Amino acid sequence: MLNILLERLRQGKRTVAFPAAMPPLPPRFRGLPVLAESPCAAGCASCAGACPTGALGADEQGLYLDLGRCILCGTCAEACPGRRVSFSRDHRLASSTRDGLVLRPGGRLPHVAPLEPARRKLFAKSLRLRQVSAGGCNACEADTNVLTTIVFDLGRFGIDFVASPRHADGVAVTGPVTRNMLEATLGTFAAVPDPRVGIAIGTCAISGGLFDGSPETTGGATPHLPLDLYIPGCPPHPLTILDGLLRLLGQQTPPPTA
């Protein structure tokens, strides 16, 4: 016991200061995609052709990137001969709306609007979530669980995960919502008392991700649940998840460091 206490004293405080200060991110961290405003070469579709999830494309408004489908693999940046696609170190990927995840050159960035006053008053200091693993690879679940360790200490914000939807204020869905998990996902959401919160964590939960189009999946939580928060990534970094949750509750979070 004494050795444990001495080791804890040696390690000191290990909880990051976020949101008061921005903690360092890993050197290889890949954040918010950036689309340059320079024109594409005529007939070039190198980046779109390389994207494994169809996140990149062009329409009458020009080049776009659907962050709700993007798995942040970086293949498009390597494939684009004009270097129009790059990845910043901005961890703030979450959005209140599905449309807000569609990025364009020089366009708006993903934005999280706080809950309306009635729900924010209820949940600002105490938000309990029931996490539903709806057929994913468990990467999003792992990064979500990391939030409860001493590094991020999710409980200090009054946010926690609970075992029963009856004790929850909302549902956080991960995975592409397989056919086998659809009924359980809908049942879990229905069991949470109103007013409730719906959150999709990870690209699979938003759009189906790499599994989109499979007859065994149903396109994530987006087609099935009223969602208040979309957190992209494959998986999203724990800081990206925490940033989205705090902004949903009306808290200010710091911008990324250079």
Image (cartoon, rainbow, N blue to C red):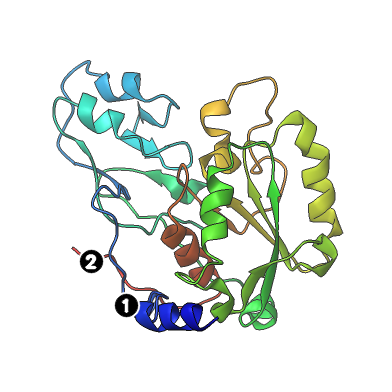
Disc 2 secondary structure class = loop
* Image side of residue 117 versus residue 251, left or right: right
* Image side of residue 38 versus residue 175, left or right: left
**Structural crowding at the residue carrying mark 1, measured as other residues with C-alpha within 10 Å and reported as few (<14), some (14–19) or many (≥20):** few
Q: In this orientation, which residue lies closer to the viewer: 157 or 68?
A: 157
Q: How many marks?
A: 2
- Determine the residue positioned at 51% across, 67% down: 113
User: Is residue 144 visible in this depiction of the protein?
Assistant: yes
Please state the horizontal and vertical placement of residue 257, each as a whole percent of the image.
23, 66
* Residue 102, above or below 162: above
Residue receiving disc 1: 21
* Image side of residue 135 versus residue 151, left or right: right
- Determine the residue positioned at 70% across, 23% down: 216
Residue 241 is marked as none
Please state the horizontal and vertical placement of residue 195, each as a whole percent of the image.
77, 69
State which tag comes first along the sequence, 2 or 1.
1
Query: Disc 2 and disc 1: Cα gap in Å?
Result: 10 Å
Residue 257 is marked as 2
Q: Amino acid at mark 2?
A: Thr
* Residue 198, above or below 121: above
